Amino acid sequence: MKAIIPQEVIEKKILLIRGHKVMLDKDLAQLYGVTTGNLNKAVNRNLDRFPSDFMSQLSREEFKNLIFHFGTSSWGGTRKLPRVFTEQGVAMLSSVLHSKRAIQVNIQIMRTFIKLREILVSHKELARKLDELEKKYDAQFKVVFDVIRKLMIPPEKPRRRIGFEMFQTLWDSEKK
C-alpha cells in the first residue's frame, strides 16, 4: 500500500527537543489535514490522555529558538506557544482524531519513528563491531578502519529545518 505521506516528509518534521524526538502541533495538524486549533481542541478535550512525557508546551525561549532557526514566515499568526508531541503522544492522537486520513497518517508517522530507531540501533551495532575488529587487528588495518569510519559519517544535507544534532548542540549551549 502506498504511503499517504512520504516518509522523508515526516522525518523532516521530527525534531529533537529536551532530549526527545518530537513533532510540533502545527506540523502534525498539517499532516492530518486539520487546523492547529482543531487539533489542540481535540487534545484539550482529552488532556488526561496526554501526560507530560507524551506532550508538552514549548517555553518562550524554545519558541524563539525555533523561530530564529526556521524563519518567521511560517510562524506568522501564532498566538500561543506550540505544543510538542513525543512518539507516544502522536500514537495517542489516533484515539482523539477519528478521520480515515488521521489513522493513515498516524500509521505512517509510527513507521517513521520505528525506522529512525532501527537506523540508530544499526549504526551503534556497526560501530561496536568495528571497534572489536580494530582491537583484534590493531595497527595492521588502521588505514582500512579509518576509511570505514569516515564512510559511516552521514553526508550533510542542506535542509530547511535544523538537524537533530545541531538543535541538540544549540539547546545544550542555551541551557549553560
Image (cartoon, rainbow, N blue to C red):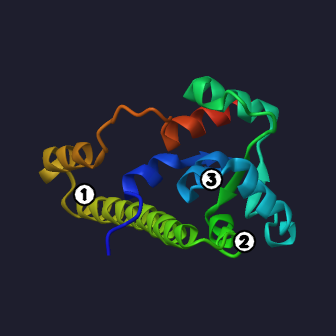
Q: Earlier in the sequence, mark 3 or mark 1?
A: 3
Vertical placement of residue 77 versus 15, above or below: above
Q: Residue at x 80, y 32 (%)?
A: 60
The kind of residue tagged 3 is Ala
Q: Which mark is residue 31?
A: none
Image side of residue 77 versus residue 143, left or right: right
Q: Provide the residue designation for mark 1.
A: 134
Secondary structure found at label 3: helix
Q: Position of residue 39 (x, y in %)?
A: 71, 57
Q: Is residue 175 visible?
A: no
Residue 144 vertical placement versus 42 (above, below): above
Write down the residue under mark 3: 29
Q: Are marks 2 and 1 in contact (CB under 8 Å)?
A: no
**SS of the residue at dot 1?**
helix
Q: Percent from the top left, x then y, of residue 68?
A: 62, 23
Q: CA distance from mark 2 to mark 3?
A: 13 Å
Quadrant of the rendered image containing residue 127: bottom left
| Image mark count | 3
Which residue position holds label 2?
Answer: 96
Q: CA distance from mark 2 to mark 1?
A: 51 Å
Residue 15: x and y, percent?
57, 47
Q: Quadrant of residue 78?
A: top right
User: Is 144 situated left or right of 102 in this image?
Assistant: left
Horizontal arrangement in the rendering, residue 100 relative to residue 173 (left or right): left
